[in-house]
């Protein structure tokens, strides 16, 4: 049995915003070992066209992601919530190995278990090439 990962559902505006900020902070570490611990052992994801099942696959996915998406910086915003679910808007910036910068925009739908671990994450994401001088996130 895993420990509880506060705040727990059902969420209110304050605890929902805390959960979103915790996710933003964790993802900005770019540490797959740390980030994957926020998800249930059997978590289900859809990330773009990838279907990911389980915490170990999340860790492998994030390792590949941050090997490709260099100097990644993310900003998340709570869009809505109800009981144990949230809708989140996000944008992040990164560059590839050639030095080309991108801004990626998207929306996520999250569902949490009773212990505060994310059991489902569905993300839709679009990438836009940008000039380094057009970056907004540092």
Image (tube, helix red, strand yellow):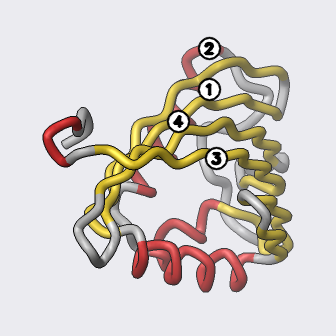
Tag nearer the camera, 2 or 3: 3
Residue at the spot x=42%, y=76% of the render?
68
Numbered mark located on residue 13 in the image: 2
> Can you identify the residue that label 3 sits on?
125
Q: Work out how far the residue at label 3 is from the one at label 1, CA to CA, in angstroms.
A: 22 Å
Q: Secondary structure at mark 3?
A: strand
Q: Nearer the viewer, residue 113 or 122?
A: 122
Of the residues under marks 2 and 3, which one precedes in the sequence?
2
Of residues 23 and 8, which is closer to you in this image? 23
Q: CA distance from mark 2 to mark 1?
A: 5 Å
Question: Quadrant where the N terminus lies?
Answer: bottom right
Q: Of the numbered discs in the image, which one, if any, rests on residue 16?
A: 1
The residue identified by callout 4 is: 90
Q: Helix or strand or loop: what does disc 4 sit on?
A: strand
Residue 56, percent from left and from top: 69, 85
Q: Is residue 54 above or below residue 17?
A: below
> Looking at the image, which residue is at 83% across and 53% down?
120
Closer-to-camera residue (39/74): 74
Count residues near mark 2 (Cα–Cα under 10 Å), then give few for <14, some for 14-19, many for 20+: few
For label 4, the crowd category at 10 Å Cα-Cα, with few meaning under 14, some 14 to 19 and many 20 or more, is some
Provide the secondary structure element on which disc 2 rests: helix
Which dot, 3 or 4, sits closer to the camera? 3
């Amino acid at each position: 049995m895993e420990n509880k990962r506060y705040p727990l559902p059902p969420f209110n505006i304050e605890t929902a915003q805390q959960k979103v900020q915790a996710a933003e902070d964790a993802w900005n570490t770019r540490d797959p070992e740390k980030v994957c611990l926020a998800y249930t052992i059997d978590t289900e994801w859809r990330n773009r066209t990838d279907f990911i099942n389980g915490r170990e696959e999340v860790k492998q996915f994030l390792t590949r992601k941050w090997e490709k998406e260099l100097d990644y910086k993310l900003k998340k915003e709570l869009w809505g919530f109800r009981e144990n679910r949230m809708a989140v808007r996000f944008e992040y910036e990164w560059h590839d190995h050639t030095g080309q910068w991108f801004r990626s925009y998207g929306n996520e739908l999250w569902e949490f278990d009773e212990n505060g671990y994310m059991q489902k994450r569905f993300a839709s994401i679009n990438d836009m090439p940008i000039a380094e001088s057009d970056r907004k996130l540092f």
